[in-house]
Image: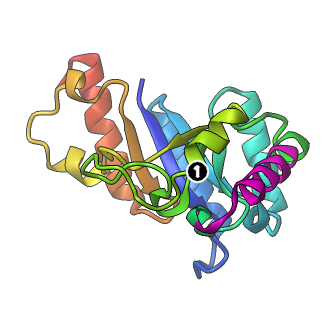
Amino acid sequence: MIYVRDDDVLLKRMAHTDAAGEFVNVHNIIEKYGYTHCPALLTNDLEEFPEVIEFIRYKTQQGKMIPQLHGSSHIDYANLSIQELIDDYRRCQDWFLANIGVRFTRHYTPWGAGGRRKDGTPMVRGTSIAPTAKSLGIEVVDMFKPLDPRHIVADPSVQWSNYEGRTITLHWWFNPEILDMALAKLKEAENGTS
């Protein structure tokens, strides 16, 4: 299985004429290849897109999407106290249940706060995030070994064993043509046709 983590879902400060359409397009590309879309949601920002909330709820019910938390807003969680973290997690869980109909189990923190850097070394900031999240049944997921679609496209001989079970990380405004090419190469490798 391949998961596609999609960060900053409909972040307010991103100026796009058809943000909802771009998000849906990314999802449709992922679904076309039978992979799982894991959008990292910003609950406050999504309030401006009721049609996207409904789309996420519908695709989640179909088993085509596993929405997770990015944050209530695109804030630096390393700056929050333990009580502020707990309060934010509870507000976000309430939002997920009321709007999507599921609980989130993972927190993809903005800027990887509380996790590991891309090279695997621990972040110094936000050391209370992971234990606080864990106490509430939430896993903090970091940016260790991210898989960029451009790397798949550039790989001259994609071997399924090198990618199976990995998570591709991107943003919903990412170039859809490159995502499509990367997922097509993975599907060929998965089917043994590359």
Residue furthest to the right in view is 98
Is 65 rendered above or below residue 5?
A: above
Nearest to the observer: residue 186 or residue 141: 141
Residue 76 location (% of width, % of height): 58, 68
The prevailing secondary structure element of the residues shown in magenta is helix
Where's the C terminus, which quadrant? top left
* Residue 92 falls inside the magenta stretch: yes
Q: How is the image coloured?
A: rainbow
Side (left or right) of 19 relative to 149: right
Task: Give percent across and percent down for residue 165.
Answer: 37, 25
User: Callout 1, which amino acid?
Assistant: Ser
Question: For the residue labelled by badge 1, is the local secondary structure a helix, a strand or a loop?
Answer: loop
Query: 150 or 96, which is in the foreground?
Result: 96
Q: Looking at the image, is 114 positioned above or below residue 45?
A: above
Residue identifier under label 1: 128
Quarter of the rendering containing residue 183:
top left
Q: Which of 70 and 81 lies nearest the eye of the viewer?
A: 81
Residue nearest the viewer, comparing 20 with 79 = 79
Residue 126 placement, left or right of 85: left
User: Which residue occupies 81% across, 57% down?
Assistant: 51
The magenta segment: 79-95
